[in-house]
Every structure is written in structure tokens, then in C-alpha cells.
Image (tube, helix red, strand yellow):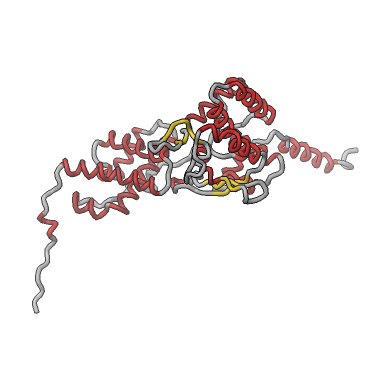
Amino acid sequence: MALAVVRDLREYRAPASEEELAQFETDVLAGFVLARASAGLVDSTIRNDTNHLDLIRDWFGRPLWEMQPPDADVYFGKVLRDAKPSTRTGRAGALAVFFQFLELRHKVELHNLTGRVVECPLDEMNRPRASVEPQLRIPPSEAEIEELFAGWREELISCRKFGPAARNYAVARLAADVGLRINEARMLDLDDVRWELGRFGKLNVRHGKGSRRRGPKPRLVPLINGADRNLRWFIEDVWGHFDADHTRPGAPLFPSERKNQDGSCARATADVYRRALAGAATQHLPTWAGKLTPHVLRHFCASQLYLAGMTLFAVQELLGHTWTGTTARYIHVHGTHVEDAWVAGQQRATDRWKGLAR
């Protein structure tokens, strides 16, 4: 029995045209967006990644799968040489995730179309490092935060639209009480409030921020620090102002005035809450005008709970941090432990000399 010669029929396939490659590139990017959405990433994260990819593509002038390590060297070493470290690392992260998608989903197809083997142009030699230290955010004092919310509460009495104003207040109060991120709060459903759990009830935070683009990191957040009272007030006295159906699955905890196509309440965007907090700070805490953000309230929460005696590990679990070092950067106590340690050291040195001097 003789062996027959087998030849790959792809040798006879006509090269892909520019139009076919352009269509394929569009389909690949659409598939990337859909895959990231199915992983549970929020729209803002997906949008940031696609914006990074668009900027790299505009500079490169060719499909990104053609990018080689020398091209990445030029882009990150020259074009983005003077860019902010966060910009460089963000763009590198988006590029690395996109190439991971290409390798997992389209490696064979790309080789058939172009003859190229997909390989990420970033390696251990040229990958931008996140060497920048996080920005130091020293939050307002407890008295200043109480002044802010006291003025905000007074404003609710005579505001033109009570429902949205009270909703914005409740979200900011949650950020200050239990350290919720704005996107974590806006993505909560009414069913995510679990009063039967724990001593005070808990929030099922399904859209917690995941580290390194790994998708959402869910956690349970106890309604401590007065958050239970704030949330009961909102649900019982405010939520009904939005004419929302509390029996509908997926009804948002913090509804918007806007409606979806099916008539149900939509969710307010994160920018709505940021603008509301900025306006309240300008009106009721002018010394912090232009500086008070939802993330600063998160730092305030961590600092106050630690100052009240909560352990660092408990604060870490509450905020949803992966690393204790990250939580430590959130804590800014107005104590004097460094100064006290210095004074104690001086006293020990003085005691050692006692009896030696005549």
C-alpha cells in the first residue's frame, strides 16, 4: 500500500482582500466588546479599553494584529514617552488584553487569512510599569462631612425635584458610611438589599471593581455606621417617587427619572452623582469646592472606621480591596501616633543616661 501525497488546500486560497481584512477587523473588535461585556465589565471600562485601542490603531495605521515588539518599543518609548504613567499603563493593559482575546479566539483564523502567528508585542522588556505612586487623598474631617450632609438635608426640604435630589444624597451618604464606589451603588438592584443578613442587613454588591481587568468582584457589604437607617429612609420614603415597580426583577435600587423602552426605570449615570456631590460641596462646604469627589468620601469612610477601632483587615474586606497595602493608603487618621512614638523614643534615650551624669 503506497502513501499518497497530502497537500494543504490553503496553499491555493487566494489572499484576503483589503475589504475582507477590514470587515474582519471590525468583526473582531465587535466580538472583543461583546466578550468583555459577557465577562461582566461595566460599560465605562470597556469604553476606556476600546478608546485606547483606537488611539493605538490610528498611530499604527494597520490592523493591530500586525504589531510587533519593535513597533511597541517605538510607540511606548517615543510617542508616549512623556505621557502620564497612568495613560501608559492603561494603554498597555488594553493592548495586552486585546491580544489575549486574539490568541484565544482568532489565532487559527488569522493565520489562515494572513499567514501571521498572533503574538502580543508587549513583553517583559518593553511593558510599561505602573511605577507611579497613587495620589494622596486626605479627606475632610468628620465635622466637615457632617456640615456637608446637614446642609444637603436642609436643601431637600425645598428642592424642586425631591426624588432625584434625595437619591443623590442617599448615594453620597452610602459612600461616606460604608465606602461604596459610585458604580457599585448605581448598579445595585432593589433585591440586593438583604435585611435578613447580619445584625444590620447587607448589600449584595455584584459589580465590585475587579483588579487588573479581571471583571467584577462581588462582595457583601454590611449596613453599618448608620447606613441601614439611611437606606430604610430612602426605600420607604423616596423610592416610590420614581413610579417604579418594586415587583419587577432587576428594579434598580437608585432609579432614574428616565425610562427604558419597556417603560421601566433606568439607572442614573455615575456622572449624575459626581455632579450632585460637587454641587453640594460648593453650596454647603465651599472650602472643598472642586475637590470633594466620591472617591474622597471612600477615603473618609476608611479613615473614620479605622479611627473608631475597626481593624485594617475588616476595613479591607468592607472596601473590597485585594491587598492590605491598598487599604492602608486609604487611611488618614488625624492622630499623633508618629509624634508620640518620637517623644517616647526621646524619653527612652533620656532614661538610659540617668545615673551616668554627675
Instruction: From the top left corner, tell me how far across and down residue 109 is, in percent.
Output: 23, 53
Q: Is residue 56 left or right of residue 6?
A: right
- Residue 88 appears in the rendering: no
Q: Where is residue 241 in the image (x, y as percent from the top left)?
A: 54, 32
Q: Give the residue at x 74% y 37%.
A: 342
| Residue 222 horizontal/vertical position (percent) | 62, 46
Where in the figure is residue 123, as x and y percent of width and height?
36, 48
Q: In this view, does 320 lie to the left or right of 35?
A: right
Q: Can residue 108 be spotted in the picture? A: yes
Q: How many labels does the image show?
A: 0
Quadrant of the image for the C terminus? top right
Q: Which residue is drawn at 24% across and 55% down?
A: 108
Q: Identify the residue at horizontal 23%, vertical 51% (top origin).
A: 110
User: Which residue reaches farthest right?
Assistant: 358
Q: Which of 36 and 108 is in front in this view?
A: 36
**Residue sitting nearer the eye, 342 or 356:** 342
Location of the N terminus by quadrant is bottom left
Q: In this view, does 69 lie above or below 182?
A: below
Residue 93 in which image quadrant: top left
Taking depth in this image into account, of 184 and 288 the one nearest to the observer is 184
